[in-house]
Image (spheres, rainbow, N blue to C red):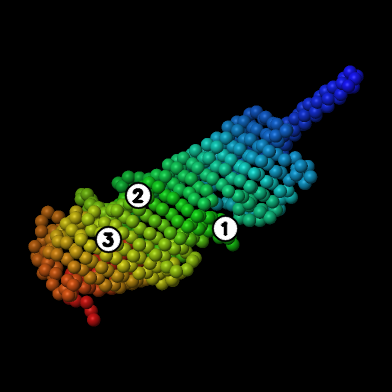
Amino acid sequence: MPQRNVSRYLKITVTILLSLILVGIAAQWFFTHKVKSILKEKVPAELNLTYGDVSTNVLLGKISLSDVSANNSEQNIDFKATSVTVSGLEYIPLLQKGDITIGEIRLEAPQVVYHQPEKDTTSKKEKQNPSKTYTVNTFSIQNGTFHMLNKTADSTATVKGIDFTLSNIKFDKETAQENIPFAFGTYELNTKKGYYSMSALEFIQFERMQLTPDAGGFKQFVLRTKYSKSELSRRLQVEHDHYNLNIDDISLTDWDFGFENDLPYFHLGEMQLRKPIFHVYRDKLLPDDTTHKKLYNQALRDLKMDLQVDSIGISDGLITYQERLEADVEPEELRFADIGATINNLHNQGKSDVAIDINATLMDNGPFSLEWSFDPQNKANRFLAKGSLSNFKSESINPFLKTNLNAEVTGTIQQMYFTISGDELESQGDMKMKYDDFEFTVLKKDGLGVNKILTAVVNLFTKKGEKTDADGFRHGDFKVERNQTKSFFNYLWINLKEGLVDTMMGRGKKKD
């Protein structure tokens, strides 16, 4: 090839390269200038957006802001982030229709603070139809923090160490009309410690949380009263339980949430609670809370949502209960250990019964079981409970009986079975029991001596276990009127108490 042609091609190549470079520089300058112009002129003034440096890359469609800060007084939100990066901006949809299509939006170390308004001043705004379609392939948060503050700037919710990804986000005129105004694909949320103030008296807390569309869970989940037992009693006008619940691990499988017909819904395939330890204390020296207590049928029925949980499993659980009846007597605990339980078909709008099956040991020695079922749709709030207790050494419950009933007992319950059916107003049931050498000691009011007369009268009926059937069981039946200011478990307890009294002190034989 002649030297002249080589020189000519070289000049053309250099010219093209220089032109491309100049076009690239011009495009980069225009892109950067346009981004800064939009940030200055198009961002609403009420957002109060500030930032440090702006870096852009026109070829990658990338915009990055450092040291970002914004707040919106109308929405009560403050926002800060180490950086906000938008990348993968597609130019063809933007130039053709004005649609915004982005590969990724990434927030580094964002801090979001939401200030709760003094009262709910929100009003339903008319939903707007966007003229453009907005699409984001991936939205991600790295090491985020969320705080919710009340009007006195006290934290009511905090979540730290938030790592979150959300894919295939789309916002257009169709999605804008939905309760969640955008469509999305998969997501994954991982956090570190979280805190939420449930009420003026209780809070929940966890060490870790993980959620995906298919599964999720919490580590070291806690529900507690904010105050000590004595401080809680000082603050209360009426009695209220002091709670201390710790759960090692909660796992969720096959769950979904959203809105349908303007009603929120939560559906869950399975929940597993591993090693829940629950301590409950009540100061009975305080006045009774005389408000109506809903049975679980009504409590579920009144939920303002659609709830369906197919199965809940509980393993290796512990529940203790204490009542303070006298100011100078330290209360003893009633204890259920080694708890294993299943709850099936927990719902408030579905069909069939909620079915609960519980197995535990009472005071660490007597195997106890309870089968309990009810239909949330039953307006009479009917329920059925069946249970048993076996090989129970009664002396183990004496510390609790001494402080709560001013009595002590000896002997062994070999087997006890009971059935209770009831509703909102009354219940009835039957019991049968086989026991050895049962003897009561009724104490004086000061607990320092024996009331010999009452002890002798009670033991006339109970000590020898007379009037048994061929299998050695004494039988009893009972009927109870519900005190509607008391809980379901109080209702269950007074049924059992009436059953025990009739079984041990009644005629003993099963009615024909």
Residue 255 horizontal side relative to residue 442, left or right: right
Residue 75 rendering spot, x and y as whole percentages: 59, 45
Residue 351 is situated, as x and y percent measured from the top left of the image, at 47, 68
Q: Callout 3: helix, strand or loop?
A: strand
At 31% across and 55% down in the image, what residue appears?
339
Quadrant holding the C terminus: bottom left
Q: In the rendered structure, which amino acid carries the disc numbered 1?
A: Phe
Residue drawn at (78%, 26%) of the image: 21
Q: What's the CA distance linking mark 3 and mark 2?
A: 18 Å
Say few, some or many: other residues with alpha carbon within 10 Å of mark 3 (under 14 / 14 to 19 / 20 or more): many
Residue 285 in view (yes/no): no
Could you tell whether 496 is left or right of 311 in the image?
left
Tag 2 or tag 1, which sits nearer the N-term?
1
Label 2 SS: strand
- The label on residue 259 is 1
Q: Which sits earlier in the primary sequence, circle 1 or circle 3?
A: 1
Q: Spatial distance from mark 1 to mark 3, Cα to Cα?
A: 41 Å
Reading the image, the residue beneath label 3 is 368
Looking at the image, is mark 1 or mark 2 nearer the viewer? 2
Q: Is residue 198 left or right of residue 113?
A: left
State whether residue 356 is above or below residue 42: below
**Circle 3: residue type:** Phe
Please provide percent x and percent y for residue 282.
Answer: 30, 53
- Residue under label 2, please give it: 275
Q: Amino acid at mark 2?
A: Lys
Q: Nearer the viewer, residue 323 or 194?
A: 194
Q: Horizontal and vertical percent for residue 367?
A: 25, 59
Which is nearer the eye, 266 or 34? 266
Q: Earlier in the sequence, mark 3 or mark 2?
A: 2
SS class, disc 1: strand
